[in-house]
Image (cartoon, helix red, strand yellow):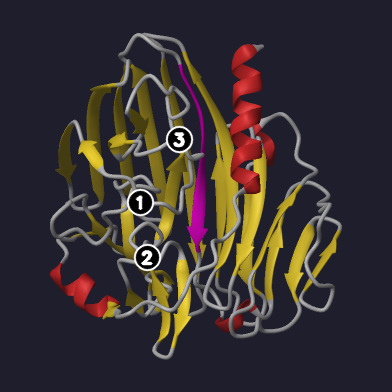
Amino acid sequence: MKAGLAIAALLLTGAATAQPVQPIPASTDPVSDLLAAAPAVTITNGNLVARIAPPDLDKGFYRGTRFDQAGVITSLKLGSKEFYGPWFERTAPDVLDYVYVPEGIAAGPDSAISGPVEEFAPLGYDDKSSPVFVKIGVGLLHRPDDKAYDHYRHYDIVSIGRRSIRTTANSITFRQSLDGAGYGYTYEKTLRLVPGTAQLVIEHVLKNTGGKPIVTTVYDHNFLRLAPGNEGVQVTFPFAVSAATPPAADLIRIAGKTLTYLRPMKDKERVSFPVTGFGATADDYDFRIADTKTGAGVTITGDQPLTRINIFSIDRVQSVEPYIAIDLAPGAQKTWRYTYTFAAPH
């Protein structure tokens, strides 16, 4: 019961987080420079080609503390169609999330990421007796004050633990082991392009090796680049969808099991809202996002029950953000996987 209440609190905290108001940055850098300098690994199964940026605190494409640093996809193509890649043109160290500048969008270090990336809720942040806390996939972080945790804020990394990487022609596996703040875990994440298909499978293994329970949530921020302005994009669920705070009726129509973008999103327009209607089994972790004009799209399935779904969009990306719960006693282990099946017009 206590674990369930803790997970509910984590979900409510995440739901209440709003984009921070911030001034225009003093200077920005082109994202192309960051891509050119960052280490990268390319994997392929003959149909899909994915470019993946490994964790690297000195030269890596993503060095933030919000998202899991492993498995960041900076490009994924099926034929000539690119589904994932940077949705911003510039980066700026003093931006907390993203902001519009004359050259386009400038993203801060903790949001300047691309692909189907994951964010775990923090562990031990509210323990005021400890100056450090844990973010799975990132490391041991410093808590500088008593302010509430804010995933837009950058926290100093005290330790990344021990990391290793294994690659094959069509897969890459990241492993991290960490001990700190009374917690301990080993976390393995594999991105695999299934031979003979247009599928990407993301597999996870998390083992609690510490003395405290690991109670957290994780969601996937699917930064999908499907159609300019998202006009004509349709999201189909296996259940009837409802929204307590729906977006503007002229932008998105919610009807039955579908959510459809009726017009292009305007410059600087942003929507973020939760949807409900899913049940208690993994059968409802099944979404189809498609461009109704071209037929390009992706079907995303998972093997875990959902605890929350959020819809996020700006004119550059469409994101379905599914959450799952994790509750591991010391010594326990959890595995989970997501499957992405892509389609693109010939």
Q: In percent of the image, x 43 and y 73: which residue is there?
A: 87
**Range of magenta residues:** 214-223
Q: Amino acid at mark 1?
A: His
Q: Amino acid at mark 3?
A: Asp
Numbered disc total:
3
SS assignment for the magenta stretch, majority: strand
Disc 2 packing (10 Å; few <14; some 14–19; many ≥20): many
* Residue on which the image places disc 3: 146
Residue 55 falls left or right of residue 207: left
Q: In percent of the image, x 36 and y 80: which residue is there?
A: 89
Is residue 90 inside the magenta stretch? no
Q: Quadrant location of residue 307?
A: top right
Q: Quadrant of the N terminus?
A: top right
State the separation of the CA atoms marked 1 and 3: 15 Å
Q: In percent of the image, x 38 and y 19: which residue is there?
A: 129
* Residue on which the image places disc 1: 154
* Residue on which the image places disc 2: 108
Q: Earlier in the sequence, mark 1 or mark 3?
A: 3
Q: Position of residue 334 (x, y in %)?
A: 43, 22
Is residue 221 inside the magenta stretch? yes
Q: Quadrant location of residue 284?
A: top right
Q: Nearer the viewer, residue 295 or 137?
A: 137
